[in-house]
C-alpha cells in the first residue's frame, strides 16, 4: 500500500498500523493520527489530524448523468487544513457525513464544526 501525504509527510510505519486500526466510514478511514482517502487502485492519501483546523457539513451540487436534468444537492463534509486548503468529502449516504464529523471531533479536541457565515444561507431550500 502506498501512502501519499496531502500536506506533511509522516513515518509510513506509523501510518500502516494507524490505517489498519482506523474506523471506516464508507470509503474514508479515520485513525488516531490521520484521515485516509483512497487514491487510485493501491494508493491512499492521508491528512494528519494535527493539520485539520475545521470540519463542517455542506450541501454540494451534484450533476446527474443527463445534461438536461440539472443538479441535485448532496450532503458532504468540508475539511479545512493547513493554510486555507480544503478537502471535500462527498459520501453516497448523507448520514456518513455526520459519522465522519463525529469521528474527527472525537479525535481532535476542540475541533471547530461550525458552518462559516458565508455558507449558512447555502442550504437545500435555496436550490
Image (cartoon, grey):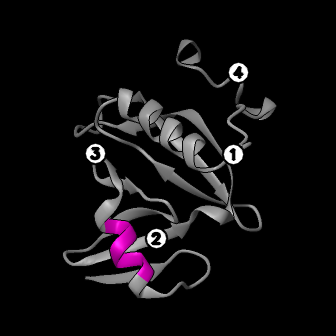
Tell me residue 114's x, y (percent): 72, 31
Label 1, label 2: how many angstroms apart (C-alpha)? 19 Å
Label 2, label 4: how many angstroms apart (C-alpha)? 31 Å
Pointers 3 and 1 in contact (C-beta within 8 Å): no
At mark 3, the secondary structure is loop
* Range drawn in magenta: 14-19
- Which numbered disc, 3 or 1, marks the residue closer to the eye? 1
- Horizontally, residue 122 falls left or right of residue 70, namely right
Q: Dot 4 surroundings within 10 Å: few (below 14), some, or many (20 or more)?
A: few
Looking at marks 1 and 2 on the same chain, the residue that comes earlier in the sequence is marked by 2
- Which numbered disc, 2 or 4, marks the residue closer to the eye? 2
Looking at marks 2 and 3 on the same chain, the residue that comes earlier in the sequence is marked by 3
Residue at point 51%, 35% (across, down): 102
**Residue placed most toward the observer, 123 or 29:** 29
- Pointer 4: what residue? 121
At mark 1, the secondary structure is loop
Residue ranking furthest to the right = 117
Instruction: Name the mark on residue 26.
Output: 3
- Pointer 1: what residue? 109
Pointers 4 and 1 in contact (C-beta within 8 Å): no
At mark 2, the secondary structure is strand
- Pointer 2: what residue? 46
Amino acid at each position: 500500500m502506498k501512502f501519499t501525504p496531502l500536506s506533511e509527510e509522516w513515518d509510513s510505519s506509523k501510518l500502516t498500523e494507524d490505517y489498519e486500526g482506523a474506523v471506516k466510514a464508507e470509503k474514508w478511514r479515520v485513525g488516531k493520527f490521520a484521515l485516509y482517502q483512497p487514491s487510485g487502485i493501491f494508493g491512499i492519501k492521508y491528512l494528519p489530524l494535527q493539520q485539520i483546523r475545521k470540519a463542517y457539513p455542506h450541501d454540494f451540487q451534484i450533476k446527474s448523468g443527463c445534461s438536461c436534468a440539472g443538479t441535485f444537492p448532496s450532503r458532504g463534509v468540508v475539511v479545512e487544513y493547513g493554510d486555507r486548503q480544503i478537502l471535500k468529502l462527498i459520501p453516497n449516504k448523507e448520514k456518513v457525513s455526520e459519522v465522519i464529523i463525529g469521528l474527527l471531533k472525537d479525535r481532535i479536541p476542540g475541533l471547530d464544526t461550525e458552518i462559516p457565515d458565508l455558507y449558512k444561507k447555502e442550504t437545500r431550500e435555496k436550490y
